[in-house]
Amino acid sequence: MARGKVQGKPLKPPTGFTAKVIAKFLDGAEWCLAKFSRVGDKPVYTRADFPWSAAVEADWRAIRAELDQVMQRRDELPNFQDISSEVKTIQTDNNWKTFIFCGYGSWSEENARRCPATVAALKKIPGMKTGFFSILAPRKHIPAHRGPYNGVLRLHLALQVPEPRDQVRIRVDDQICTWEEGKCLLFDDSYDHEVWNDTDGWRAVLFVDFVRPVWFPFNLLNWFILRAAVFTSFIREAQDNQTKWEKDFYAQAQKLRGR
């Protein structure tokens, strides 16, 4: 399905007959979800489109304090591609770090236990599917790409935005947006998008994917597809990678405390 004026490629283009058939089915589903979306079909949304975002923003300072604790071990955090191998098509360096709380119903229990304010905020988001800290190093560029499916929308709660702020930006389709600490940026990642941090500081957001509100009966179609996604190999691989990383990360911390 064509998404917007600017066309990019998905993180992992389909290969093989079965994958291409599934891709065709998803194209049709995406057309239905865009047409019957309760919030319209556009690259970037306003906070007014999602009134519950105000409650998430109200917690931002507590979430930022938890991020500050996580950042003390920033170099040990996994690179995004270490968790989700499909990200290797756009990221191969060590400059995009993650700290994952939840991915498609699978919670990282120890990460969640250490960041209760963040978890409480995530649970305020209707249809939250995935939530984590997304941390970009200075001078990091994420090249143009698009997400695989428009049945979810994306929220970034800006937690740490270096100056000059206009040099930390995201393009979604043909719109350029910047982050403001304590504010939510909401967009559809199935549109082509690209990110720059052209500063000497670190940028961090709470990164959330949540279910697109869709009119009945197409909300049931979306529910079915998102439920089926849990059983795909790339999501199961990501969950396994996250579980292993979390176990090793906290085991190392325990060893350091025992010295």
Image (cartoon, rainbow, N blue to C red):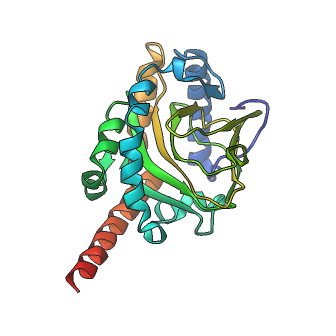
Residue 167, percent across and down? 72, 48
Q: Nearer the viewer, residue 200 or 34?
A: 200
* Residue occupying image coordinates x 20% and y 82%: 258
As drawn, the residue found furthest toward the bottom would be 259
Q: Nearer the viewer, residue 159 or 107?
A: 159
Q: Nearer the viewer, residue 217 or 116?
A: 116
Q: Is residue 90 above or below residue 59?
A: below
Q: Is residue 30 above or below residue 236?
A: above
Decide if residue 2 is in sight here.
yes
Is 137 left, or right, of 252 in this rendering? right
Q: Nearer the viewer, residue 13 or 172?
A: 172
Q: Is residue 56 above or below residue 107?
A: above
Decide if residue 104 is in sight here.
no
As drawn, the residue found furthest toward the left would be 258
Residue 35, percent across and down? 60, 16
* Residue occupying image coordinates x 54% and y 62%: 81
Quarter occupied by residue 150: top right
Residue 191, percent across and down? 67, 35
* Residue occupying image coordinates x 44% and y 71%: 76
Residue 86, percent across and down? 56, 57
Position of the C terminus, as image quadrant, is bottom left
Question: What is the total number of numbered labels drawn onto the structure image?
Answer: 0
Is 4 left, or right, of 214 in this rendering? right
Position of the N terminus, as image quadrant, is top right
Q: Is residue 67 above or below residue 123?
A: below
